[in-house]
Image (cartoon, coloured by chain):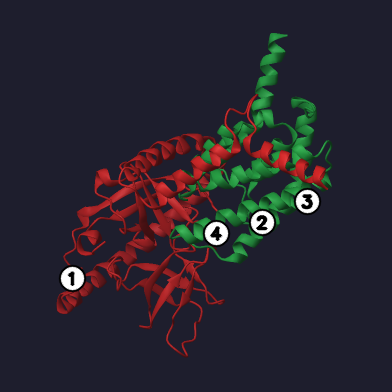
Amino acid sequence: MAKNSILNKIYNTGPLILLYYLCISEVDTNLENVFEIFTLNFQIIIIYFWVLKKPEVMANGHIFLAGLINDVVMGFPLGISSLSYLIIIFVGTYVRNKSVNTTIASDWFTFLMAMVLSSILFFSLLNNFSDLSFPLTKIGYNMFFTLFMFPIFWLLFNLYQITFVGPRDV
Amino acid sequence: MSVSRDDFSIAFRSALLQRGGAQKFSVLSLILLALIIFFLDVYGVKFTKPVRGFINDVVYRVTFLASAPTRFFPEIGKDFSNFLNVKGENERLKAEIEKYKLLELNVEFLKDENKNLQKILETEYFNQNLSNIILAKVLVDKNSPFLKSIIINKGTSTGILKGMPVTKDNYLVGRIVETNYLSSRVLLLNDLNSRIPVTLNQGAQAILSGGGTSKPVLEYLPEDFEITEGINIFASGKDGIFTPGTPIGKTNNEGEVELFIDPNQLSFVTVNLNIQEKGNF
């Protein structure tokens, strides 16, 4: 029984560990060397899925901290990734409060809303308050591929949730 | 209608303020905290710089450790394939040594000739103190879709300052844009925000502009200038940052610049501490 409980704890912290690891390590989800325009914001997919499906595994404070770490590693002004992640949490929690059961299509659509809001905030703050500037095409490619890959990761995370974490709490 | 509006406001408020269970902080409080941190960092209040520097140093070292497995496994594969090719490589290297022995004489002659010519021109870089060049290890090389930069393991403690040029094997790779006590961030030549004055081997001046891709492009070329394949690009040094004549890359048939050093394959770089002493930053 105790062994099971430890295993459950490990499974439950899996997504959070993945988020932290992606933020702090050199591992990236961009295949620019293979396909130059392919860039992906994997962190927001992880956050959105788990906030929507099982918010207990993604505490707000941890996501905030992961954002700060991401800013340091990437060289962005501190707090900007945290803000963008918090917008994702906000939309995810709102959708969760308003809906009883969701499908992959509805999650995909609401993810688009969350991503657009978070990206607008992220890039407008960066362009207006820092020396960094980014062309719209790069941002567009990043958003397009993130949106495009969402259903694939949705299925993978869903499988992980069903197998290891358990169903959504009502 | 009013019920629907109530639903909306309840869900909205709940999403912003909800706490309890695993959520110890509400989204709204964290958003406010993130905004405060952001503006403190951007507007550089006196105490934020050393704090940011300390956080950077700690996080960069943790990143270096956390990335060890990702560096370790590709290295094993590379070592194994090198081991299998060792005999063939030995023969190839022997042939290359012979070739370079012949070239060495030529180089000696050219070196003397170059020294004499520099004496005639009295260039300010002739007596440059090469002992002020330090070797640094690349700690973090995270491939961001928007920023192309690396973190090196030397900072202000070794005399590194913002703006110093960074090279590898005497080829230019970028410049220092952020300094901490024990680490620094190098902005690579292919970064979107990188612009450096260059000279072409035909004497024309231009600006090398990073596009976020692996190959930067040339801008502000003279009118009617036609870019052909194989033109060598050097730093012009007009900005007072880069040493004039530092080789950078070669143009390809699409008019882009293929850098001599692959920005994704950096493990050690050198930082020239001389330049900062001359420039005003």
**Nearer-N-terminus badge (4/3):** 3
Kindly identify which residue carries mark 2: A143
Question: Residue B42: percent from the left, percent from the top?
Answer: 41, 52
Question: Is B255 left or right of A155, judged from the image as shown?
Answer: left
Q: CA distance from mark 2 to mark 4?
A: 15 Å
Query: Which of the image's four quarters has the N terminus of chain A?
Result: top right
Give the amino acid type for the residue marked by disc 2 in the picture. Met
Q: CA distance from mark 1 to mark 3?
A: 62 Å
Q: Quadrant of residue B24?
A: top right
Kindly identify which residue carries mark 3: A109
**Nearer-N-terminus badge (2/3):** 3
Binning the other alpha carbons within 10 Å of mark 3 as few (below 14), some (14 to 19) or many (20 upward) gives: few
Q: Report which colour depicts chain B.
A: red
Question: Residue A137: percent from the left, percent from the top?
Answer: 62, 66
Label 2 vs label 4, nearer the camera:
4
Q: In the image, are marks 2 and 4 on the same chain?
A: yes
